[in-house]
């Protein structure tokens, strides 16, 4: 055996465990406003961070030390001060922007909490149902992408689809399938005041949260949120645009659901799909994002589909499988769009 290789791998295992611990500490940093309190403040003493957050001093002290060892904070031993560099603040104290990464921290505890049950499923089959993750997890999923949806969907992504924005401006109809807590539906309703907007999701708790958020944003009259899948949903008019964001790989009945979506579209309507960015070949996914997405898959996306008797397509379904599903569902055309993104792939399809 190669001793250097053993040592290098031991370092990697410690690095991975450090990453898991950093996730937990960073979760607290987002949830309890520690990052926000330190953003743009420069060096701060422990007492200043405690005063700015009104949190327990001993917890703050340990968190500051832990986040320093994890590389999130700069520490100056001469002054005993801690600083959140502006470049880090840009990513972790920027909720609501398209560059906020704190949603990942918020999803991590929910993902890892089901690891023991997922381990059982390796023997028993089945999996963890979406609703068993609870409302906090639905909100954490929302936090991962909400900034991108709010800041890029109508300004950058939709303009890549011919006619779609014009039709919605003229009072078209849009359905968001797998709407979760309603971020896409609310973004569309805000941008297109004349459009009819419907959000559909089988998870009742997500729909309850979506209705609550829409009410708070004054959008209740503009959006119908419905706790159903496309299997049950029978509207009396077709849609000009159907969006399916980060959910096609989750479907328990992908082919039937995509067929339903095709039949819900107007003859000249458009399906716009956003999926996690993964290559078709495993060897092309050997990088940090690949490991993040395979983790999401085992501990959420794949297992919740298997729990409902689905195929468990998984987070890293990739473009070839996506196009194959759309072809099997009878879509006449499917195009992968050249929209730039580090984390997502984009497709449009016509019925
Ligand atoms: C990862 S979440 C994405 C939520 C939201 N679209 C977003 O991008 O934040 C996947 C969603 O798909 C929903 N879903 C799963 N199967 C579905 C189906 N057959 N029809 C509609 N929605 C479904 C889940 O309930 C969940 O809310």
Image (cartoon, helix red, strand yellow):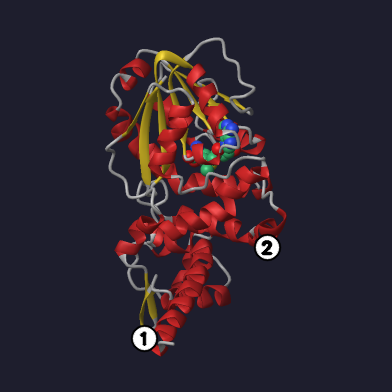
Mark 1, Cα crowd under 10 Å, few <14 / some 14-19 / many 20+, is: few
Q: Is residue 238 above or below residue 66?
A: above
At horizontal 65% and vertical 38% (from top left) the residue drawn is 205
Would you say residue 92 is visible in this rendering? no
Q: Is residue 163 above or below residue 157?
A: above
**Farthest-out residue, right:** 124
> Which residue is drawn at the image coordinates 40% and 29% (left, top)?
272
**Residue closer to the observer: 275 or 35:** 275
Residue 177 left/right relative to 194: right
Query: Where the C terminus falls, by quadrant?
Result: top left
- Which numbered disc, 2 or 1, marks the residue closer to the eye? 2
- Where residue 134 appears, as percent x and y from the top left, is 66, 47
Q: Which residue is mark 2?
A: 116
Name the residue tied to disc 1: 77
Residue positioned 48% across, 74% down in the render: 18
Position in image of residue 88 (x %, y %):
34, 63
Pick whichever, 66 or 336, lies toward us. Answer: 336
User: Residue 260 appears in which quarter of the rendering?
Assistant: top right
The picture quadrant where one finds residue 268 is: top left
**Disc assigned to residue 339:** none
Regarding residue 149, the answer to whether it shows in the image is yes
Q: Earlier in the sequence, mark 2 or mark 1?
A: 1
Q: Helix, strand, or loop for circle 1?
A: loop
Quadrant position of the N terminus in the picture: bottom left
Whereabouts is ligand 1, in terms of quadrant? Answer: top right
Decide: is 37 above or below 181: below
Q: Position of residue 92 (x, y in %)?
A: 40, 58
Q: Is mark 2 within 8 Å of ligand 1?
A: no
Label 2 to label 1: alpha-carbon separation: 41 Å
């Amino acid at each position: 055996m190669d001793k250097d290789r053993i040592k290098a791998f031991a370092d990697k295992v410690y690095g991975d465990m450090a990453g898991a611990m950093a996730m937990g500490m960073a979760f607290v940093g987002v949830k309890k406003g520690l990052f926000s309190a330190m953003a743009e403040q420069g060096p701060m003493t422990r007492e200043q961070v405690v005063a700015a957050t009104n949190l327990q001093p001993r917890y703050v002290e340990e968190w500051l030390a832990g986040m320093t060892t994890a590389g999130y904070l700069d520490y100056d031993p001469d002054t005993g001060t801690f600083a959140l560099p502006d470049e880090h603040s840009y990513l972790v104290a920027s909720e609501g922007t398209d560059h906020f990464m704190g949603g990942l921290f918020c999803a991590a505890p929910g993902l890892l909490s089901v690891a023991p049950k997922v381990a059982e499923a390796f023997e028993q089959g089945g999996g963890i149902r979406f609703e068993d993750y609870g409302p906090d997890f639905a909100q954490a999923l929302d936090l991962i992408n909400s900034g991108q949806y709010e800041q890029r969907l109508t300004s950058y992504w939709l303009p890549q689809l011919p006619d779609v924005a014009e039709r919605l401006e003229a009072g078209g109809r849009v359905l968001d399938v797998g709407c979760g807590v309603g971020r896409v539906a609310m973004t569309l309703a805000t941008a297109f005041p004349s459009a009819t907007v419907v959000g559909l999701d089988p998870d009742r708790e997500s729909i309850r949260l979506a209705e609550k958020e829409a009410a708070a944003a004054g959008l209740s009259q503009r959006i119908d949120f419905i706790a159903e899948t496309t299997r049950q949903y029978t509207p009396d008019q077709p849609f000009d645009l159907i969006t399916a964001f980060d959910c096609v790989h989750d479907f328990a009945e992908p082919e039937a659901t995509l067929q339903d979506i095709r039949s819900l579209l107007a003859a000249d309507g458009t399906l716009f799909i956003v999926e996690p960015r993964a290559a078709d070949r495993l060897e092309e996914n050997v990088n940090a994002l690949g490991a993040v997405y395979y983790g999401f898959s085992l501990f959420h996306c794949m297992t919740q589909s298997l729990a409902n008797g689905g195929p468990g397509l998984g987070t890293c379904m990739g473009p070839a499988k996506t196009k194959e599903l759309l072809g099997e569902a009878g879509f006449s055309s499917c195009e992968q769009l050249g929209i730039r993104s580090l984390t997502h792939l984009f497709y449009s399809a016509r019925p």
